[in-house]
Amino acid sequence: MSIWEYANPKKFMQTSGVVLPFLVVLTVAALVTGLVWGFFFTPEDYKQGSTVKIIYIHVPAAMMAINAWAMMLVASLIWLIRRHHVSALAARAAAPIGMVFTLIALITGAFWGQPMWGTWWEWDPRLTSFLVLFLFYLGYIALWEAIENPDAAADLTSVLCMVGSVFAILSRYAVNFWNQGLHQGATLSMDAEENIANVFYVPLLICIAGFILLFLTLVLLRTRTEIRVRRINALMARERMG
Amino acid sequence: MIAILIRDMALAIRAGGGFGLGLAFFLIVTVLVPFGVGPESGVLREIAPGILWVGALLACLLSLDRIFALDYEDGSLDLLATAPVPLEGVVVMKAVAHWVTTGLPLVLAAPVLGVLLNLESGGFTWLVVSLLLGTPALSMIGAFGAALTVGLKRGGLLLSLLVLPLYVPTLIFGALAVTRGAQGMATATPLLMLAGITFACLALLPFAAAAAIRVNLR
């Protein structure tokens, strides 16, 4: 029993088919609990008022936007090294989800920034690097769509994903030179002396768990779709041959 | 490898297009900006470093798809890939040829256009230095993008979409060096970062680009 068993599309379809319903239930449970708790049962911040509640969507979405790219990077490497098709398809499936999370983070951030900073948009390092991340997602998806041969598309997008990761990190640090930040520091970190207050902390963690589960569910679902599309194409090709 | 460099430069110069086109585009962009923002010399002076860098970057973008596309169409890229020279070396030479025919003229033209935009007199040296350090990175990153899209029918627009986000760090440090130089501040940090990006690109991206070409030639 090893993780590479799931490189077999059939095995992957079987297992993911069993796991998926549980994941859906868990996702809905975590998201409903976290969001309802966060929106209705936490006190308002003494400075930010009720706008603080955007945090329950903004922070998890931003975290997943970055982690989705990291997952795509790992999946791309697995494809390049071991050439498992499921891995390449998982990377392809994750990209639009990551892009939507990036967009959610940007839009909720704008809604938050308007009352707090008095502006919808500010060329702040964090905001700017998220915009750049969005452009990276856009290019990655466009490259997938543009190339017809599925194996060549998987290879080229994997290379782009690796190079893009390096440049995304580089851009993240380059924008620090270019403008001082308006955005607050990290809300959650393992080593920080002072994190967000506990009343907000617990529902936020549940929301983050919910977003992680949501991401996993969507990736599994979309990977299954991609595998099915691949199968249909193969069947149609065989039909034409016969 | 030198032969490839000379061949590519000769092709670029004789076929026209790329050589003069980039320069003309650079000129037009810098001339259009004052029409857009108004003729106040104070405003122009402030935005001149950024405009010159963005203009150079866009002019560089114009001729990127020619790096590999013509060779791909007539089959000489296949020959180069099977030649005893490593494909990585071919990629570097093609990027260098692109830089000599596109980047270098831009560097030389930039001070003249700087006069048009009222660039601070202290900024001219830094403009040339930063462009000299930064434009090779633009050519190399562009060669990588061109390698990714070489097999596509209409890769031009996609190429811009892929390459522009990769240009962000180079643009930031390049324009920052000029802005700081024009205001009489220290320019060492952005210039060092710019040089770092250029050398890292030249050292690492040829491998990624050659891998992409091999996939496209499969």
Image (cartoon, helix red, strand yellow):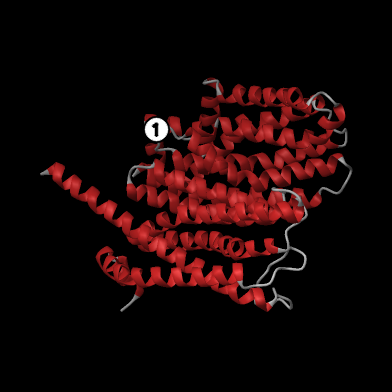
| Chain label for disc 1 | B
Q: Residue at x 72, y 38 (%)?
A: B131
Most foreground residue, A94 or B190: A94
Q: Is mark 1 on a helix, strand or loop?
A: loop
Q: In this view, does B9 lie to the left or right of B85?
A: right
In the picture of the structure, the residue carrying the numbered disc 1 is B153
Percent coordinates x, y for residue A97 in the rendering = 47, 56
Q: Give percent across and percent down for residue A194.
A: 73, 76
Q: Where is residue B20 in the image (x, y as percent from the top left)?
A: 61, 22
Q: In the picture shown, does residue B158 fall above or below B203?
A: above
Which residue is located at x 61 percent, y 49 percent?
Answer: A131
Residue B84 lies, in percent from the top left, at 41, 44
- Quadrant where the image shows the C terminus of chain B: top left
Q: Which amino acid does label 1 sit on?
A: Lys
Residue in front for this viewpoint, B129 or A221: A221
Residue ID at (76%, 26%): B113
Asked if residue B145 shows in the view, the reply is yes
Q: With A5 as the anchor, is B178 left or right in this view?
A: right
Residue that extends furthest to the front in the rendered view of this protein? A40
Q: In which quarter of the view is residue A204 placed? A: bottom right
Question: In the rendered view, would you say B85 is above or below A105?
Answer: above
* Farthest residue, direction left: A242
Near-viewer residue (B45 or B7): B45
| Left or right position of B160 against B30 | left
Q: Is residue B86 visible?
A: no
Q: Is residue A69 above or below residue B95?
A: below
Q: How many marks do you count on the picture?
A: 1
Alpha-carbon neighbours of circle 1 within 10 Å: few (<14), some, or many (≥20)?
A: few
